[in-house]
Image (tube, grey):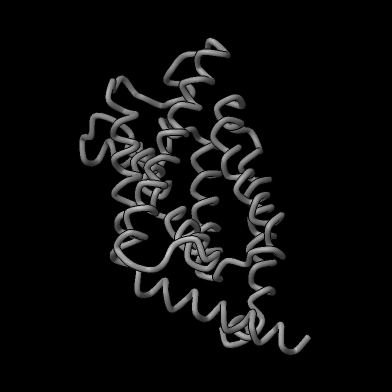
Amino acid sequence: MANYEKNPEMLHLILLALVAVAYVFSAINPIDRLAWFGQMTPAVLLVLLLVASYHRFRFSTFAYVMVFLHVLLLLYGAHYTYSNNPLFNYFQEQFEWQRNHFDRVGHFAQGFVPAFLLKEFFVRGGYVKKGKVLWLIVILSCLGLSAAYELSEFALVKILAVPVDLIMGTQGDYFDSHWDMLWALIGASIATVVFGSFHDKQMAKMEKHLIKDKDSN
C-alpha cells in the first residue's frame, strides 16, 4: 500500500485494466443486449471522461477506487439487467420482497460516488469553498444528474418504442423513478456529510503528491 501512496498512478492503471476485464465479462452473453447497452453506457462514458481528463485534473486515489467499484456495479447490473439480478432475486425469495431491489443499490451509488467527484472538482478547481454551501451544491448536483438519467431513460423508451420495464426496470412501480432519485439523494448526502472529513484527507494526499511530483520535474 505504501508503494501505491508514493506512486498512485500505478494503482490507477491497475484499476483501469481491471475495468477493461470486467467490461469484457459483462459483454459476454448478457440477458438482453439492448438493456445491456443502455445500462453499461454510463459506465463507459464515465471511464472515458476520467481517462481523457487525467492529465488535466487528477482526482484522489480514493475517488478513483470509488468509481472503480461503481463501474463494476454498473457492468454487473447491465449483464443481468437491474430487474433480474440473480443475487437480489435470491434475496427477493428469502425475504419475500415484492421486487428485485438491485436497482435501489445502483441508484444509491449513482448519488454516492459522483458526490466525491463533484466535491473534488468544485473545491480543487477553485469554484466553491469548503462549507455547508458546498454540501448543498454537491447534493443538488447529484440529484440533478439522477433526474437527467431518468429523463434519458424516458427518452430512450419513447424513441425506440420498447417496453418501459426493459429500459427503466420499473417492475410495475409507477413511482420507480421517484424512488431512484430519492436513493441517489440519500447516497449523495451520506457521501458529502458522513464521509466529508475522510474525503478531505484523501484530497490533501493527492494535492501533496501532485506538488511533490511537479517539484521533482
Residue furthest to the left in view is 96
Q: Nearer the viewer, residue 75 or 205?
A: 205
Q: x, y (%) of residue 48?
A: 68, 49
Residue occupying the point 68% across, 73% down = 9
At which x and y percent is residue 29? 63, 33
Q: Position of residue 204 (x, y in %)?
A: 49, 79
Q: Residue furthest right?
A: 217
Q: Residue at x 29, y 49 (%)?
A: 186
Q: Is residue 132 above or below residue 40?
A: below
Q: Quadrant of residue 45?
A: top right
Task: Give the residue at x 60% y 24%.
Answer: 34
- Location of residue 5 in the rendering, given as x and y in whole percent from the top left corner: 58, 83
162 over 130 or under it: above or below: above
Picture quadrant where residue 198 is located: bottom left
Tell me the quadrant of the picture where the N terminus can be found.
bottom right
| Residue 169 placement, left or right of 14 | left
Residue 50, image quadrant: bottom right
Q: Which image quarter is the C terminus in?
A: bottom right
Depth order, front residue of 135/41: 135
Name which residue lies at 46% across and 33% down.
148
Q: Residue furthest top?
A: 161
Residue 203 vertical position relative to residue 126 in the rendered view, above or below: below
How many marks overall? 0
- Name the foreground residue: 105 vs 215: 215
Above or below, comparing residue 124 to residue 32 in the picture = below
